[in-house]
Amino acid sequence: MVNLSATFQNHTFANPLMNASGVHCYTTTQLDELLASSAGTLVTKSATMAYRQGNPKPRYRSLALGSINSMGLPNEGLPYYLDYVLAKQTQADVPTLFLSVAGISMQEDLDMLAQVDQSDFNGFTELNLSCPNVPGKPQVAYDFEATEKMLDSAFKLFHKPLGVKLPPYFDLAQFDIVAKILNQYPLAYINTINSVGNGLYIDVDSETVAIKPKGGFGGLGGAYVLPTALANVHAFRQRLNDSIAIIGTGGVQTGADVFAHILAGADLVQVGTQLAKDGPDVFARLTQELSDVMAQKDYHNLSDFKNNLKEL
């Protein structure tokens, strides 16, 4: 028998799978559909303090090897998502939930964290330091000084379990620097990676870009980013304190991809582009495929292979 239950900071989930923030989590209807699916838990759309329309359409395009998007943080505002998770956490059959926040400024982030801290929310809060698709707003997590300043301020006012969503890093020296910063704080987890920012897809037939915002530049997801995502998961697992869990995100199409994320050191695994393509039914397929891979390898629990990646 294969047991897919995942332990994450003393919380247990039926399986390690969940949506990636930004995909199928904009409305309460979509969130309810995730709860009704085979996903182990869910994360809300990254919220700003108030409703935000986001970038002009078309701002998402499905591609043969993944997707490109420049959404621009469209969302219903923090009160909408906070009300949802507060209502759901009182229901016995609902797993521990994740609430994502992504302010347009450091002060907005801090104001939202303060509001969540003062609420009765008892799940995980995720601070998104890595949105690559807001015109004129650089990613905080690529500015190491700003990242440290943000976390200093956040932990002075926030007293609940907090994780951070990170962009992909591409140099081993960057992993060293970022891990040294993160290890200073009582983080519950990191979520790695957000989309690979500012890719450009060109439609040769029409000789145009694929999306409207930012002249066609947007975040890449799907199969394009799987090796980068696995590298970030593994590099951070090698460098972070054991007390900091890891959510692996990026490139998951099959149960074997989920297995690879966990093998590299992920505790939970998020699905983005494939969820956008297949809808919430994707989680039933992925859990079955993960079970099949584990059974073939005679693994009974996730702990049998988690963070057991072998080197040559």
Image (cartoon, helix red, strand yellow):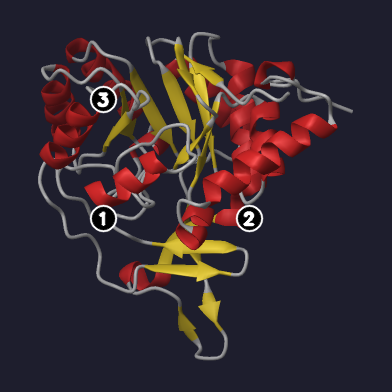
SS at circle 2? helix
* Amino acid carrying mark 1 in the image: Gly
Quarter of image, res 299: top right
Which residue matches tag 2? Answer: 223
Q: Nearer the viewer, residue 259 or 140?
A: 259
Q: In front of the other: label 2 or label 3?
A: 3
For label 3, count other residues whose C-alpha is less than 10 Å away and answer few (under 14), some (14-19) or many (20+). few
**Residue 287 place in picture, x, y as percent:** 61, 39
The circle on residue 136 is 1
In primary-sequence order, the first of circles 1 and 3 is 3
Q: Is residue 108 left or right of residue 205?
A: left
SS at circle 1? loop
SS at circle 3? loop
How far separated are the C-alphas under marks 1 and 2? Answer: 28 Å
* Amino acid carrying mark 3 in the image: Gln
The circle on residue 91 is 3
